[in-house]
Structure formats: structure tokens, C-alpha cells
Amino acid sequence: MDITHGKYLGVDYGDKRTGLAECDISGMLASGITTVKEGGMRNTAVRVAKEAKDRSCKKIIIGLPKNMDGTEGQRSEVIRAFAEILATLTDIPIDFYDERMSTMVAYRYLDVTETYGKKRKDKIDTLSAEIILQGYLDKERNSTK
């Protein structure tokens, strides 16, 4: 394993809340950072670009919601529009990861840990970003074997 993999920033974009996660420098483990509530696509993109720069990330991974048959729907168009704005604000490469089921997995995890109410609402987006980023890392690692 290359320990100089570099940090990635995982993003679970939402209209009201956007979850962020980052991985360790070896690219093995994703960890949730925070949920941002900047308001508006451009403001959120500015914050994400700043977080990626401040954390010295070498790639930004954005969850792309696909339909169960693998096609992209209206929500994917919104995510791609967000990514286009983000790309104008940073020179850090941006990639996408199919986020089907990530929020469902996050909800199940929070059920198991008995996290409810306001705590649940505060954690769901960050946890979803962590799941998206970890999935991307795992896929990347498995494809290089």
C-alpha cells in the first residue's frame, strides 16, 4: 500500500445540508468531518473548495445518486451542476461515486447505535459522506490489485 496516497474529501451534497468526510493520507479509512449548512449551491461549493484546500486534499469525491437501474435522474443533474460550480473554484480533481443506498446504510447504522432525534439529523449527512468516500476508496484499492 502506498502511504503517500494523499487525502480525499468526500461530499454528500444536499440542498440544505452537505456532509463532508476525509480519508487518511494512506487512503485506507474515511472519517466524517462535519455537515455544512451554507445555503445555496454556490455558497456550499465555496465552502467545499475551502475545506479541500485547507485539508490539502488531492481529490474531491462527490456522491452521485443513480436510479436503481444505474441511470441518472434529475437529482444527478443537480449534483453535476454543483460539481461544475465547484470545478470553477478549485483545481483539485473531482470524481463521482455512485451513492445508491448510502443514506439508507447511514440510517441503518444510526438505528443500530440508537441515535435519534436532533443527534440523528446532525450526523446523517456526515455519515453519508463517510460511506461514499469509503466506498470510493475501497473500489479504488480493489481495482489496483
Image (cartoon, grey):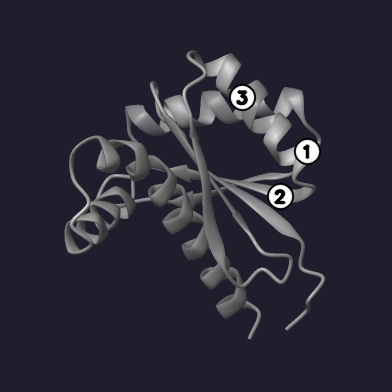
**Residue 120 falls left or right of residue 42:** left
Secondary structure under badge 3?
helix
Q: Please give the label number shown on residue 45.
A: 3
| Label 2 CA crowd tier, 10 Å (few <14, some 14–19, many 20+) | some
User: Is mark 2 in CB contact (under 8 Å) with mark 1?
Assistant: no
Mark 3 or mark 1: which is in front?
A: 1
The residue at which mark 1 appears reads as 53
Q: Position of residue 85 (x, y in %)?
A: 64, 21
Q: Position of residue 113 (x, y in %)?
A: 23, 61
Type of amino acid at the residue the image marks with label 2: Lys
The residue at which mark 2 appears reads as 59
Pick whichever of labels 2 and 3 is earlier in the sequence. 3
Q: Please give the label number shown on residue 9.
A: none
74 w.r.t. 145: above or below: above
Q: Position of residue 91 (x, y in %)?
A: 81, 35
Residue 107 visible? The answer is yes
Pick whichever of labels 3 and 1 is earlier in the sequence. 3
**Residue 92 falls left or right of residue 17:** right
Mark 3–mark 1 distance (CA, rounded to whole Å) = 12 Å
35 w.r.t. 10: above or below: above
Mark 2–mark 3 distance (CA, rounded to whole Å) = 14 Å
Residue at image position (75%, 45%) is 55
**Residue 68 falls left or right of residue 45:** left
Which one is in front, 41 or 124? 124
Type of amino acid at the residue the image marks with label 1: Lys
Secondary structure under badge 1?
helix
